[in-house]
Image (cartoon, helix red, strand yellow):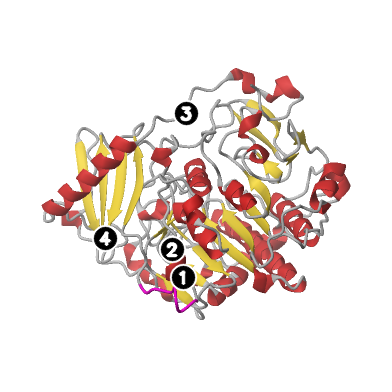
């Protein structure tokens, strides 16, 4: 019987086969004394206004907030505009244009994957003696066995290969095909092992419990690297009534149900932190919580990027500026980091944080280690972050591009924004009334007033003409809500940023996306999604 997000649930080791117990308990030959554990929690589609420390009067994220007070909170954390490209950028430390993922997500019927010549984050941690685990959403390709998580550096994987999995049945529809997408894989496996016995268990709880099992059964002679990539808070809004009732004061039903999903993730963070503390290893563990992109804006989604413009799948701030924090040994406590940090920066930053050598990374990574800027070590800590430029993306299929340099952000659009782009300002599920924007600061307690919007000026509004080339420029330091287009008055800056876009365009590799393949149909493989070539 399904009891929802906060059911009493204990994942039985036997349900995942004897290999799980064997692999978790195995004693590795390599020893890595002195290196901290790493728990990287990636939330799916959580909007800028969906954590209470950003001042939302609706969201309740006490556990995430508490971590923020003990570590460093990033107020300018940037990602790619959508799921697969962000995950690819995180795992490789490269912009989406440099791994062929600039044009969108890898749908489950597409024979494509994160290029095999790319070495991924877990492989570098494995080199340093870490036992590496991936839990939850993969979404960077699986059409061949070589693309599975355990073939890319993870010792174990428990989760789903694509997006869109039902929170209770763990199955999904993609291109009119239907099948189970829940797997347990180990590095020793030649194929994926489907898990049928967990029907009815809520996904967020199930993934959290698996992470807790791994921590409790860890090999204490080696540190662990756990990549917990949640299904939540991606729509549809499926959650338990008890959690929904926490938000009875929220009038919009879609927003209310969505906030219950946010609460389930926050509860998960609380449970894991409590376990780490109970195991006596909290002070020896680096914890990261971040969203993969901005919240999706649609009638039945419920996310909010307020007061930023736009949402998921756009280059506006609401699509790529997300909540993120880090806490753990060596991290400055109570710090608000307002310099630029890009999702590609996590790999080199974390390698520095655990005492690795970033010279082991490929020469062509786009990520920059920001450890010196957030380290509590007085010998390393610096006031200014090292990043002054961010390529937001170049999307050839849509004819859209954006780049940030210094205080300025340039948007280039050829032929108008793509259909369905959420390019307006939204409080939750409806358009934002600009007179209400100060409500973000009404909540009592610890709030980061990270966004102070300028006044919108209709005379300088950024309008993209569907029949011609359009360029808009914003001073996002003074105008983070992207109200006022200053392209006409800052021609030299426009020219400079267009030159930078031209340079990045010259370095772009071809898109890896391909047409769907009917051989992906899970009906051909016992109704289970998995590799088909």
* Helix, strand or loop under label 1: helix
Query: From what the image shows, is residue 394 above or below residue 201?
Result: above
Visible in this render: residue 337? yes
Q: Where is residue 62 in the image (x, y as percent from the top left)?
A: 60, 72
Task: Identify residue for label 3.
Answer: 513
Q: Distance between the residues labelled 2 and 3?
A: 32 Å
Which of the two discs, 1 and 3, sits closer to the camera? 1
Q: Distance between the residues labelled 2 and 1?
A: 7 Å
Q: Is residue 425 left or right of residue 17?
A: left
Point out the tag, 1 or 4, that comes first from the N-terminus: 1
Q: Position of residue 264 (x, y in %)?
A: 66, 60
**Residue 374: image tag:** 1
**Mark 1: few, some, or many residues within 10 Å (few <14, many ≥20)?**
many
**Residue 406: image tag:** 4
Q: Pointers 1 and 4 in contact (CB under 8 A)? A: no
Task: Identify residue for label 2.
Answer: 370
Which segment did they paint magenta? 377-383
Q: Pointers 2 and 1 in contact (CB under 8 A)? A: yes
**Mark 4: few, some, or many residues within 10 Å (few <14, many ≥20)?**
few
* Helix, strand or loop under label 3: loop
């Amino acid at each position: 019987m399904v009891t929802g997000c906060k059911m009493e649930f204990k994942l039985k080791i036997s349900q995942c086969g004897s290999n799980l117990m064997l692999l978790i308990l195995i004693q590795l030959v390599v020893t890595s004394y002195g290196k901290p554990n790493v728990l990287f929690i990636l939330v799916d589609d959580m909007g800028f206004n969906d954590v209470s420390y950003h001042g939302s009067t609706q969201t309740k994220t006490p556990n995430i907030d508490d971590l923020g007070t003990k570590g460093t909170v990033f107020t300018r954390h940037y990602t790619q505009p959508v799921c697969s490209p962000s995950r690819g950028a995180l795992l490789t430390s490269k912009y989406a244009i440099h791994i062929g993922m600039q044009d969108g997500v890898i749908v489950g019927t597409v024979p494509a994957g994160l290029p095999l010549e790319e070495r991924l984050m877990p492989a570098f941690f494995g080199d340093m003696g870490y036992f590496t685990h991936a839990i939850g959403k993969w979404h960077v390709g699986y059409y061949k066995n070589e693309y599975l998580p355990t073939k890319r550096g993870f010792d174990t994987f428990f989760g789903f290969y694509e997006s869109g999995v039902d929170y209770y049945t763990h199955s999904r529809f993609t291109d009119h095909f239907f099948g189970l997408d829940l797997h347990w894989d180990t590095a020793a496996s030649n194929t994926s092992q489907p898990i049928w016995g967990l029907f009815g268990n809520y996904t967020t709880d199930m993934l959290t419990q698996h992470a807790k099992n791994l921590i409790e059964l860890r090999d204490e002679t080696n540190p662990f690297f756990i990549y917990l990539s949640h299904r939540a808070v991606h729509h549809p809004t499926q959650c338990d009534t008890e959690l929904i009732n926490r938000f009875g004061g929220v009038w919009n039903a879609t927003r209310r149900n969505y906030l219950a999903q946010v609460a389930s993730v926050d509860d998960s963070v609380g449970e894991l932190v409590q376990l780490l503390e109970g195991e006596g290893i909290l002070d020896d563990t680096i914890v990261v919580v971040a969203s993969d992109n901005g919240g999706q804006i649609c009638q039945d989604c419920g996310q909010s990027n307020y007061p930023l413009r736009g949402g998921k799948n756009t280059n506006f701030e609401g699509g790529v500026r997300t909540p993120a924090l880090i806490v753990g040994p060596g991290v400055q406590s109570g710090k608000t980091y307002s310099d630029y940090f890009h999702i590609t920066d996590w790999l080199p930053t974390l390698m520095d944080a655990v005492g690795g050598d970033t010279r082991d990374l490929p020469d062509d990574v786009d990520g920059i280690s920001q450890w010196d800027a957030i380290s509590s070590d007085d010998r390393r800590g610096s006031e200014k972050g090292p990043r002054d430029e961010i390529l937001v993306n170049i999307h050839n299929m849509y004819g859209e591009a954006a780049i940030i340099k210094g205080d300025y952000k340039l948007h280039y659009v050829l032929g108008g924004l793509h259909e369905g782009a959420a390019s307006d300002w939204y409080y939750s599920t409806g358009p934002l009334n600009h007179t209400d924007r100060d409500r973000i600061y009404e909540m009592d307690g610890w709030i980061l007033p990270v966004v102070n919007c300028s006044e919108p000026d209709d005379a300088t509004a950024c309008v993209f003409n569907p029949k011609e080339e359009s360029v808009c420029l914003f001073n996002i330091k003074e105008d983070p809500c992207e109200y006022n287009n200053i392209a006409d008055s800052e021609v030299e800056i426009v020219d400079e940023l267009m030159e930078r876009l031209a340079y990045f365009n010259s370095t772009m590799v071809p898109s890896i996306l391909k047409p769907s393949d009917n051989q992906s149909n899970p009906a051909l493989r016992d109704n289970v999604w998995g590799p088909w070539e």
